[in-house]
Image (tube, rainbow, N blue to C red):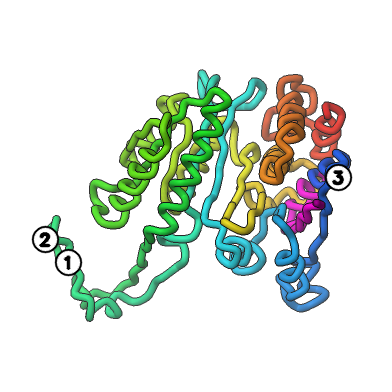
């Protein structure tokens, strides 16, 4: 059955990596139909909004989406993330020879950060401190009561048991798949469970309970600040890490720096009924139109899309084609020490395929 993939080109320099990635996928002659939406500046000029109803209908009629970076989280990105309930943000981090890592010895770095994608602080439940007065909040461990007479703002962090179980279950399933291919079979949970003894401890506890249901998997736990340190000291120790929204956001970017930066970091956001794939870097307005943005992250998002649709062999071929460019070292973009254009890099990948 033909699978329909909706293409969101994104803003500024994003289309310069999205369009060639989709063209490469199309040339693989798979049973995939790509449908192109009108969003962003193009849609504003035509419809007066960056996310018109026509784009929403196209997304709703597709199996998944491939998306370039956007300037506004409230538009198409927000709809895909919260509207489609894509609770799992999957951030693989893998070093291969040729990547411009700042580490002395990056060999063997190969892990995945599973970030809960909907809850925590990021939905933005905020307001004036005085609104909390009726709650009479007290921290029994520290014996401190919130002074609601102070002027200031608050933000509410929410972790629900259901979504926490969902993200931990998916982390275990990915760890099992990786183990079948020679992975460590290790799931590490990280949060601030020593101080946030309700929300973060619940996250830690559910992760431990979930891992125990998967024979053959090992469980590890790290307080989040120690985890940040361990990622730098010994990133090779990790296999699958699972953490909450804010922690996963920050540490996944740190992890990308270990192998050479966000231009190399793919990203998948997966829910029970929908998924979308896109690089984690921004729209790069300073280099828009210059044909120099690194397309690696988006190309590897194409790899993750193929895996999601069940084209495992084709995904492996495409990943190998991307990494061969780095091993050869002849068509690297400026951020990786070369002088190749975006187009030249993509053509090299296509030639490898």
What residue is rendered at 31% in x and 56% in y? 199
**Which residue is under mark 3?**
26
Give the residues drawn in magenta, as a range: 1-20
Q: Are marks 1 and 2 in contact (CB under 8 Å)?
A: yes
What residue is rendered at 37% in x and 75% in y? 127
Q: Quadrant of the C terminus?
A: top right
Which residue is outermost to the left? 143
Q: Residues within 10 Å of mark 2 (few under 14, many from 20)?
A: few
Q: Secondary structure at mark 3?
A: helix
Answer yes or no: is residue 211 visible.
yes
Answer yes or no: is residue 50 visible.
no
Indicate which disc, 1 or 3, sits on the residue closer to the N terminus: 3
Query: Which is in the foreground here, disc 1 or disc 3?
Result: 3
Task: Give whichever of 118, 166 is nearer the camera.
Answer: 166
Asked if 192 appears above or below 342 in the picture, the reply is below
Could you tell me residue 340's position as x and y percent?
80, 32
Asked if 349 appears above or below 298 in the picture, the reply is above
Q: Residues within 10 Å of mark 1 (few under 14, many from 20)?
A: few
**Which residue is under mark 1?**
138
Indicate which disc, 3 or 2, sits on the residue closer to the N terminus: 3
Task: Give whichever of 146, 22 is nearer the camera.
Answer: 22
């Amino acid at each position: 059955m033909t699978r329909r993939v909706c293409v969101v080109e994104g803003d500024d320099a994003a289309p310069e990596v999205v369009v060639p990635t989709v063209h490469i996928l199309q040339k693989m002659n798979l049973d995939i139909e790509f449908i192109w939406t009108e969003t962003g500046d193009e849609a504003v000029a035509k419809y007066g909004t960056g996310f018109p109803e026509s784009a929403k209908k196209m997304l709703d009629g597709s199996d998944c989406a491939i998306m370039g970076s956007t300037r506004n989280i409230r538009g198409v990105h927000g709809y895909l993330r919260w509207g489609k309930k894509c609770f799992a943000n999957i951030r693989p981090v893998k070093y291969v020879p040729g990547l411009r890592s700042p580490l002395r010895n990056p060999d063997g770095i190969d892990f995945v950060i599973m970030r809960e994608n909907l809850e925590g602080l990021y939905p933005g439940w905020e307001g004036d401190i005085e609104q909390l007065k009726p709650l009479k909040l007290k921290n029994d461990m520290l014996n401190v009561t919130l002074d609601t007479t102070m002027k200031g703002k608050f933000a509410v962090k929410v972790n629900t048991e259901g979504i926490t179980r969902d993200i931990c279950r998916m982390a275990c399933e990915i760890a099992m798949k990786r183990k079948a291919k020679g992975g460590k079979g290790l799931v590490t949970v990280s949060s601030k469970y020593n101080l946030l003894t309700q929300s973060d401890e619940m996250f830690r506890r559910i992760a431990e309970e979930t891992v125990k249901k998967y024979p053959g998997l090992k469980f590890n736990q790290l307080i989040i600040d120690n985890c940040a340190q361990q990622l730098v000291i010994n990133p090779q120790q990790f296999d699958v890490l699972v953490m909450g929204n804010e922690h996963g956001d920050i540490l996944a970017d740190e992890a990308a720096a270990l192998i050479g930066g966000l231009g190399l970091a793919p990203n998948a956001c997966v829910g029970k009924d929908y998924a979308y794939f896109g690089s984690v870097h921004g729209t790069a307005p300073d280099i828009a139109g210059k044909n120099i943005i690194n397309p690696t992250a988006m190309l590897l998002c194409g790899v993750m899309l193929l895996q999601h649709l069940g084209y495992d062999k084709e995904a492996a071929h495409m990943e190998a084609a991307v990494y061969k460019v780095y091993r050869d070292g002849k068509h690297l973009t400026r951020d990786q020490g070369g002088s190749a254009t975006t187009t030249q890099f993509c053509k090299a990948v296509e030639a490898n395929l």
